[in-house]
Image: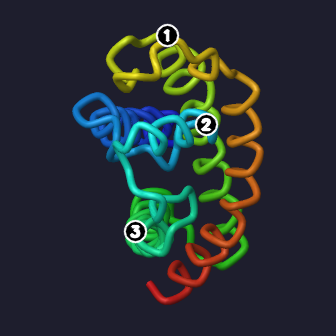
Amino acid sequence: MVIFLESVIGCLLFSIIAGGMTYLKPLSMISDYPPEIQNRVRELGLISDEQKRYSKSDIIRKLIAIIVFGIILAFVVHKFNGVDTFIKGFGYSYLLWNIVNWWDAIFNDCVWFCHSKRVIIPGTEDMKEYKDYLFHIKGSLKGMLFGIPVCLLVGVFVMIF
């Protein structure tokens, strides 16, 4: 029951944060849009050539988020689940990571993003890439790999707690 509640809370929080940022200001999340849309937005002059998917500022922002997320997740699994070893910390956090990761791919990306007019950037309305489900599924597969070092970090933090 605890993992269910943690999963629901994690999915809701992620949806509110990432979805809210995309909904309120789509260009703030341009690094998460398909490359073809990013290129069109760049051609339209809405973003600079320096704003790439893996720009220095994007990487720094994500590294900070990883550390903060790792600490919070380690605290949660330690405090509420009694997880007290590296292996348990890694395994439990990786399970939660993937639940939220696939929620993001299926609901936030394939259902909401691919069908919401609110995320469409002016000048790109004609682009079929807004409904590129495969882009989001591939992103989630990459997210599974990306979760490994994050959850290894959680395992370390659990040992520290």
Mark 1 to mark 2 CA distance (whole Å): 15 Å
Marker disc for residue 61: 3
Residue in the image at 50% along x and 65% along y:
82
Mark 3 or mark 2, earlier in chain: 2
Crowd rating for badge 1 (residues with CA inside 10 Å; few <14, some 14–19, many 20+): few
Figure quadrant of residue 105: top right
Q: Residue furthest bottom?
A: 160
For the point 46% across and 22% down, the residue is 124
Q: Quadrant of residue 122?
A: top left
Quadrant housing residue 45: top left
The residue to which callout 1 is attached is 115
Q: Residues within 10 Å of mark 3 (few under 14, many from 20)?
A: few
In this view, 128 is above or below 154: above
- Image coords of residue 25 (percent x, y): 26, 37
Q: Nearer the viewer, residue 68 or 133?
A: 133
The one nearer the camera, 130 or 123, is 123
Q: Nearer the viewer, mark 1 or mark 2?
A: 2
Residue placed farthest to the left in the image? Answer: 24
Q: CA distance from mark 1 to mark 3?
A: 27 Å
SS for callout 1: helix
**Mark nearer the N terminus (1 vs 3):** 3
Q: Which mark is residue 34?
A: 2
Q: Position of residue 63 (x, y in %)?
A: 48, 73
Percent x, y of residue 84: 57, 75
Q: Name the front one of labels 3 and 2.
A: 2
